Amino acid sequence: MAKSLRSKWKRKMRAEKRKKNAPKELARLKQALSLDKKVDSVMTDAEIVTVVPAEKITKQTDVELQEAEGDGGKMDVDIKRNKKTLLDEHGQYPAWMNQRQVKKLKSKRIAKKSGQGKKKKKGIAW
């Protein structure tokens, strides 16, 4: 569908437009980066901050959360899902899976369970 003359022409024109605008875009990018450097050079000693390890911050936030919520405030988000069948512990499929995929997996699971691995062939059996 994307092989028509019109789409080829549009693609060609977009490529030329990119070539034409590339120097302007590069200049704008360099200008934005130079503005960033100017801000860093203007910084004073009062604006400099000390670096704290991430572990210390996470420990502090965990302690604060536990104090605020209490013992029963934790929420269990981890869903245990079988990688082969994609079923969770309640027998539900994921939300992103459509009904056709669900039906296909379900039929495979039932066929394996009942032992009907092979389908019967149509036609005359000799």
Image (cartoon, rainbow, N blue to C red):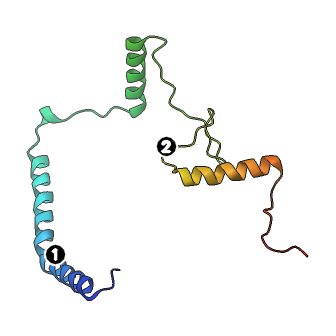
Q: Residue at x 8, y 45 (%)?
A: 42
Q: Residues within 10 Å of mark 2 (few under 14, many from 20)?
A: few
Residue 126: x and y in percent read: 91, 76
Residue 28: x and y in percent read: 11, 65
Q: Which of the two residues, 60 or 53, is positioned nearer the viewer here?
A: 60
Q: Which of the two residues, 25 or 34, is positioned nearer the viewer here?
A: 25
Q: Which of the two residues, 39 or 59, is positioned nearer the viewer here?
A: 59
Mark 2 or mark 1: which comes first in sequence? 1
Cα separation between marks 2 and 1: 43 Å
Name the amino acid, label 1.
Ala
Residue 25: x and y in percent read: 14, 69
Q: Is residue 51 above or below residue 5?
A: above
Q: Residues within 10 Å of mark 1 (few under 14, many from 20)?
A: few
- Judging by the rendered image, the residue that carries numbered circle 1 is 22
Name the amino acid, label 2.
Ala
Look at the numbered disc 2 and give the secondary structure of its residue: loop
- Please name which of the two marks, 2 or 1, marks the residue nearer to the observer: 2
Q: Is residue 96 above or below residue 119?
A: above
Residue found at the far bottom of this picture: 5
Q: Which of the two residues, 84 or 126, is positioned nearer the viewer here?
A: 126
Look at the numbered disc 1 and give the secondary structure of its residue: helix
Q: Residue at x 40, y 28 (%)?
A: 58
Q: Residue at x 10, y 72 (%)?
A: 24
Residue found at the far front of this picture: 124
Residue found at the far right of this picture: 126
- Judging by the rendered image, the residue that carries numbered circle 2 is 95
Q: Quadrant of residue 6?
A: bottom left
Please indicate whether residue 73 sits to the left or right of residue 12 in the image. Answer: right
Residue 18: x and y in percent read: 18, 77
Q: Is residue 55 above or below residue 23?
A: above
